[in-house]
Amino acid sequence: MEVLQVVADLVCTRRVEGMQAVSLRVLQSEQGVVSVASDPVGVPEGKWVFVTTGSAARFAMPDPLTITDLAICGIVDHWECAGNAQAVTPDAAAADTGARADVRAAP
Amino acid sequence: MEVLQVVADLVCTRRVEGMQAVSLRVLQSEQGVVSVASDPVGVPEGKWVFVTTGSAARFAMPDPLTITDLAICGIVDHWECAGNAQAVTPDAAAADTGARADVRAAP
Amino acid sequence: MEVLQVVADLVCTRRVEGMQAVSLRVLQSEQGVVSVASDPVGVPEGKWVFVTTGSAARFAMPDPLTITDLAICGIVDHWECAGNAQAVTPDAAAADTGARADVRAAP
Amino acid sequence: MEVLQVVADLVCTRRVEGMQAVSLRVLQSEQGVVSVASDPVGVPEGKWVFVTTGSAARFAMPDPLTITDLAICGIVDHWECAGNAQAVTPDAAAADTGARADVRAAP
Amino acid sequence: MEVLQVVADLVCTRRVEGMQAVSLRVLQSEQGVVSVASDPVGVPEGKWVFVTTGSAARFAMPDPLTITDLAICGIVDHWECAGNAQAVTPDAAAADTGARADVRAAP
């Protein structure tokens, strides 16, 4: 599973029947790689989510026959963008506190 | 799922039986990576489409026994090529308005 | 699906039982990445083929229980090696006309 | 299968139903690539683990219907971080002896 | 399928039940990428093997319920390391003749 950020909706009026009317979201990784996921959760733009790929993506949908290979499985409470961490200045870090990971040491 | 652009047809007169007479399209990512997908939709050249991989690709075909691991699932209404966005001049941007993404903020 | 070039046979006298006596071919991508595919078609060396991965590879074999995750599905009539196109001089281009793709505009 | 290091817990209070209350761990490869795995073993932070992907990840969970595409399958007794080996000075090497792989020659 | 070299055993005393007591080998690609495979063949260290991924890896094991996503399927008779070929001097090439591929032209 990967942690990606929701950046936009994807509008596709013409699609194969098996896609049904499922919501599609454009996601972006910390490295800027763009992908498209089906969204059974209903995630607001800007949130960091974790996604599953392959057949597990179908099982994450309410209808497991939905055609998808990438599905949003949950919203990460907090996430620190590790890839950009080195470029973050103290001021910038203060400004995006809300995007930091709530990573706890394993008990 | 990924968003790719249809750039050409692929002609394969000699193929395994399970491929049937399915249409094959050459797709290209924003980074220029080339792949081949089966096309159950009938997409004109130049359009941006989103594709599914793995077993989901078979379920996207009218006959789910078709041998494929990459299938076109729908046509993206509009798509802005993010990878090239930095190189776009104002004039060029005006010229390719039709290829920009209709990305809406999630409600 | 990807388009790769057959560059050699692979000789493996000691293999797991489920591989049977299937022909194995060494394939190379335009970028020079090497992989091994099972060959149900019988492709001469030098040809460009398209391949399927994952479970679809098994369905491409005459016996779908054959152990494989990459199978040749057909021979591409003609293929232009896009990755090398920029380095091709007019003379060289004339010399390798036989390797150019028969890519037709979608109707 | 890959060998990755457990670096943190991942907190996701809002998740799809099929994820149940499974523990999620943030893993990091030797090259610094971050991914998220379900953890049926209960691994302390800092340990090197090996993981399976795809459908095999589900079979590694106590409940094979758990939605996951990356699961921790075991703890590596010792692991030498090959990617950093070239940068290791004798002193540093002595300091992290506990992280070296117990790799034995095959009999 | 890929061709990789066996470089070591992997010792994991604590593992999920479905892994059973299967042998695990550390493999390395020509580019130096490290992965872990289950070994139903019993391959001596240093040999080049070809491996299958995904669900095909499970079918390569004596017990197809073994949890694995990468399994050794056979030993390559001879293999020329293409990635290092350019750096090989005549003397070095003579010394590692045993590692060269027995690649025959397809009939």
Image: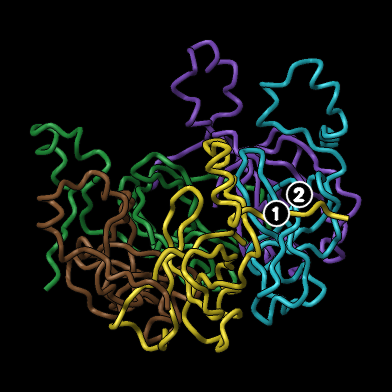
Chain colours: A brown, B green, C purple, D yellow, E cyan
What residue sits right under mark 1 in the picture? E26
Q: In this rendering, does residue C33 appear at all?
A: yes
Identify the amino acid type marked 1: Val
Disc 1 secondary structure class: strand
Q: Position of residue A102 (x, y in %)?
A: 27, 70
Mark 1 vs mark 2: same chain?
A: yes
Frontmost residue, C102 versus A45: A45
Label 1–label 2 contact, CB within 8 A = yes
* Disc on res. E6: 2
Q: Position of residue E99 (x, y in %)?
A: 83, 34
- Residue drawn 24% across the image and 70% down it: A78
- Residue drawn 43% across the image and 63% down it: D7
The reply, left or right, for residue D94 in relation to residue A96 is right
Q: In this rendering, does residue A69 appear at all?
A: no
Whichever of callouts 1 and 2 sits on the residue coming sooner in the sequence is 2
Quadrant of residue E29 within the rendered picture: top right
Quadrant of residue B92 within the rendered picture: top left
Q: Position of residue C37 (x, y in %)?
A: 71, 50
State the separation of the CA atoms marked 1 and 2: 6 Å
The reply, left or right, for residue A71 in relation to residue D99 is left
* Disc on res. D73: none
Disc 2 secondary structure class: strand
For disc 2, the chain is: E
Frontmost residue, D103 versus D72: D103
- Residue drawn 16% across the image and 47% down it: B98
